Image (cartoon, rainbow, N blue to C red):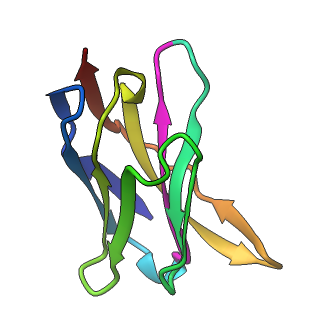
């Protein structure tokens, strides 16, 4: 499975961006997909995830501001980022995984990610 994130950029506080993730390779081995981010000096964290059936989950810090979606026919995933804050500044990575026994086993094929910078 290969994943390529894109769509980052520089925006002002309150602005918006739409990130995209293109999946390729053994895509039949993908169940859940998710967006992670890593801010300078901080650990990588899961921001949002979505199952193959469209069930979504969000970190509390982005709930009601970010929206995750996926297009299984196009092997794409998106993250709409609204009402951006300076603390959302980070490199955003997409991830994919398989589910087994109710758990998600993430592939962690991070790639380069895409940088989101929110100015105050």
Q: Farthest residue toward the right?
A: 101
**Segment tinted magenta in the rendering:** 30-40
Tell me residue 87's x, y (percent): 42, 23
Q: Is residue 51 above or below residue 11?
A: below
Tell me residue 57's x, y (percent): 57, 63
Q: Is residue 57 above or below residue 5?
A: below
Q: Is residue 19 above or below residue 12?
A: below
User: In terms of depth relative to the viewer, which is nearer, 1 or 81?
Assistant: 81
- Residue 36 shown in magenta: yes
User: In terms of depth relative to the viewer, which is nearer, 120 or 71?
Assistant: 120
Please name the residue shown 34% across and 83% down the image. Answer: 72
Please name the residue shown 55% across and 71% down the image. Answer: 32
Q: Quadrant of the N terminus?
A: bottom left
Dominant SS type (magenta) = strand
- Residue 89 shown in magenta: no
Quarter of the image where one finds residue 102: bottom right
Please name the residue shown 20% across and 45% down the image. Answer: 17
Q: Quadrant of the C terminus?
A: top left
Q: Is residue 37 above or below residue 30?
A: above
| Number of on-image labels | 0
Tell me residue 95's x, y (percent): 49, 55
Quarter of the image where one finds residue 92: top left
Tell me residue 74's x, y (percent): 24, 80
Q: Is residue 55 left or right of residue 10?
A: right
Please name the residue shown 37% across and 60% down the image. Answer: 67
User: In terms of depth relative to the viewer, which is nearer, 55 or 43?
Assistant: 55
Q: Is residue 73 left or right of residue 42?
A: left
């Amino acid at each position: 499975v290969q994943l390529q994130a894109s769509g980052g950029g520089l925006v002002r506080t309150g602005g918006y961006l739409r990130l995209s993730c293109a999946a390729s390779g053994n895509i039949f081995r993908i169940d859940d997909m998710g967006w992670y981010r890593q801010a300078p000096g901080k650990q990588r964290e899961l921001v949002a995830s979505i199952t193959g059936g469209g069930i979504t989950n969000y970190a509390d810090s982005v709930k009601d501001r970010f929206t995750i979606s996926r297009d299984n026919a196009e092997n794409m995933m998106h993250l709409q980022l609204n009402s951006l804050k300076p603390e959302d500044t980070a490199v955003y990575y997409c991830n994919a995984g398989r589910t087994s026994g109710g758990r998600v086993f993430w592939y962690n094929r991070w790639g380069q990610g895409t940088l989101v910078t929110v100015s105050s």
